[in-house]
Amino acid sequence: MNSDTSGTDGALAPRRYTDFRAALQLSYEEEISGAAYFAGLASHFEGRPHEALMLLARIEAVTAAAVRPLVVHYGIEAQPSATLRAAGRAEAEQRRGQSWAMLVAEMARDFPAYVEEFDEIIALAPAEDRAGLAVLRDHEVAAVDFAQMERAGDPGSLSPLHDFLARYQVA
Ligand SMILES: [Fe+2]
């Protein structure tokens, strides 16, 4: 995951991309590791936090599956899924003991940078691939909306996650 920070609030700075294929590979790999990361985090919690984190894990997996055809199309050789999942689980393990409120605050602060990154990747993409990459932006917007609503104590905060899955999850 991205660990660069900038600005006085410590928020993540978006990474800059110049090569579409490299950016697509990284995005795909980070969705696979992200699914394991959120599932790992979910195991640290019960109740609503567990439910939210499992939804985020599913969203990462759905997003990876949605961009996989383009990864194949471009002949990209991603790192083995087992390696990526192990990295995601390890990152979750490092966060054991972190409170739900802290995790949510961090998501709300840092995830908007990923929306910017995905906008940049989509802009770099060949025009015919852009529609197929909208899922990258949409899943991150859902996560940002969730985090900001959850931080504000909105009881409907899971709805952006459910809405994303209703739209993109293949039955
Ligand atoms: Fe993601």
Image (cartoon, rainbow, N blue to C red):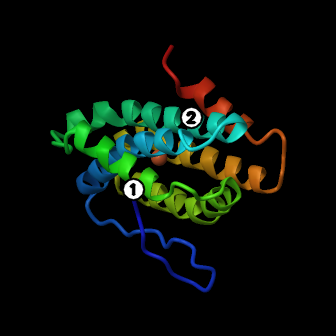
Q: Are marks 2 and 1 in contact (CB under 8 Å)?
A: no
- For residue 77, what is the image quadrant? top left
- For residue 48, what is the image quadrant? top right
- What is the x, y in percent for residue 47? 70, 35
Give the amino acid at mark 2. Met
**Residue 161 in sight:** yes
Q: Nearer the viewer, residue 7 or 41?
A: 41
Give the amino acid at mark 1. Ile
The residue carrying pointer 1 sits among few (fewer than 14), some (14 to 19) or many (20 or more) residues within 10 Å by Cα, namely: many
Residue holding disc 1: 121
Q: Secondary structure at mark 2?
A: helix
Q: Nearer the viewer, residue 10 or 24?
A: 10
Earlier in the chain: of badge 2 and badge 1, it is: 2
Quadrant location of the N terminus in the rendered image:
bottom left
Toward the bottom, the furthest residue is 8
Please tell me which residue is depicted at 38% across the width and 46% down the height of the picture. 89
Residue holding disc 2: 54
In this picture, residue 28 sits left or right of residue 4: left
Q: Nearer the viewer, residue 58 or 140?
A: 58
Please tell me which residue is depicted at 59% across the width and 40% down the height of the picture. 53
As displayed, is residue 137 above or below residue 163? Answer: below
The residue carrying pointer 2 sits among few (fewer than 14), some (14 to 19) or many (20 or more) residues within 10 Å by Cα, namely: many
Toward the top, the furthest residue is 171
As displayed, is residue 108 above or below residue 62? Answer: below
In this picture, residue 98 sits left or right of residue 123: right
- What is the x, y in percent for residue 118? 46, 54
Please tell me which residue is depicted at 59% across the width and 28% down the height of the picture. 165
